[in-house]
Amino acid sequence: MAYGPVLTIQYPPGLSFRGGSVLQSHWPVSLVCDVPGAPGHLSVLNSSCQLSPPALRGRTKVFLRLSFHVSSDTGWGDDAASFTLRAACQNENGTLADNAATRELPVLRPVGVVVTGLESSTYVSVSSELPERRAIAHRYQVQNLGPPAVPVAVTFELPIRAELGFLWDVSVNLSGGGQEFTCTPPLTLRMGPAAQTPNEPVTRGCLGASVCTRVRCQVASLASGESRRFNFSGELYRPEDGAKLGARRLRLRSEAAVSIDETKYFQIQPEEFQYSQITTEVELISRFNPVPVIIGSSIGGVLLLAVMVGLLYKFGFFKRNRPMTPEETPGGEPVSGGPQGNEAPPEPPAAQGATDPEGVS
């Protein structure tokens, strides 16, 4: 049984003790610590924690978590922080060899490195039949929000061979700042649709391509407030293979992600600010073919004309009003006042006042 157990913590001045908590124990145990570090030796600070209940049973194991804050004004460099913990109690005769332990831990400094997408090509249209070239540009910016200068690695994934045989002849242009940085040669990432699971949407990496490429750029030192810009530009085209494509839409997506040395730094920005994506929508437009419209209009016009002629004929539009001939009269009788058959026309009447040559003497 240990009465009045106390834990003493020694740590370097560049750290400030924030407190402790119990992660796991065999019996209910609580921890009470004095947060301000008491001045100790010239190169260390001291803090202490008391465990309760004031009497611990034998063979009791307690797992603790101790928190420290790293001062940004302290130049740690590559040095690690040394911690010494000592356990003691009131009824222990002297200090045993296993009552103290010293460990060195790397000091992780907080940094805020983010990547954002700048103004880029979000829509282009290409002919589905004619060979055309369209310029596409994806632009990203990497910025250090501070406070310390930090080396940054940026990984880009770019679609270089899209669906339906389209190619993006992309090249990289770098700008911003006077520090040097290098990029590795493009590396083919994956080929074919087998790399994607049909039932699960692809939320990271490049999209809309059968072949992607990976480019990794290393910035030697990115100071607080500085930024670097990466411009990927090139022409999107389709090699002439004689095949005709229908009207449809394609989506080409690139991605940029930043990473740091996690043995020296840790990100204070959320994960969604550590990567960015840009999507370009490619629309395939078919050329208008007037031949089917002309043929359809001609056939429709002929059919409409035939229907109109039939309706006009049905309502007697094409019948003329003319005199009826004797053969067309009822009973075959001639019309009154007209000549009958081959009869000679009647003689004209004699002139009035004419004398008969054999008349009265």
Image (spheres, helix red, strand yellow):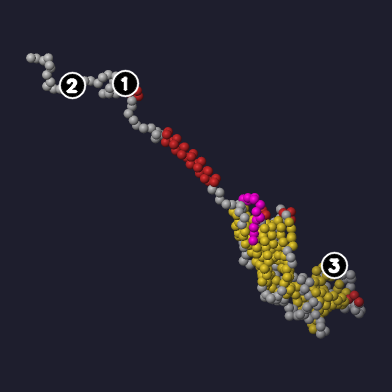
Would you name the residue on which mark 2 appears?
349
Quadrant assignment for the C terminus = top left
Q: Which residue does the numbered mark 3 point to in the structure image?
A: 26
Please tell me which residue is depicted at 73% across the width and 80% down the height of the picture: 73
103 vs 326, nearest the viewer: 326
Query: Whole-percent x and y of residue 125?
Result: 60, 57
**Cα distance in 3D space between marks 1 and 2:** 28 Å
Q: For residue 326: magenta?
A: no
Instruction: Write the start and end of the magenta stretch as one range.
Output: 235-246
Q: Compared with residue 59, is residue 198 higher up or lower down, i.e. above or below?
A: above
* The one of 11 and 294 positioned closer to us in this rendering: 294
Checking the image for residue 352, the label placed there is none
Residue at 86% of width from left, 76% of height from top? 102
Q: Which residue is mark 1?
A: 333
129 w.r.t. 232: above or below = above
Q: Nearer the viewer, mark 1 or mark 3?
A: 1
State the image quarter where residue 146 is shown: bottom right
Q: Residues within 10 Å of mark 2 (few under 14, many from 20)?
A: few
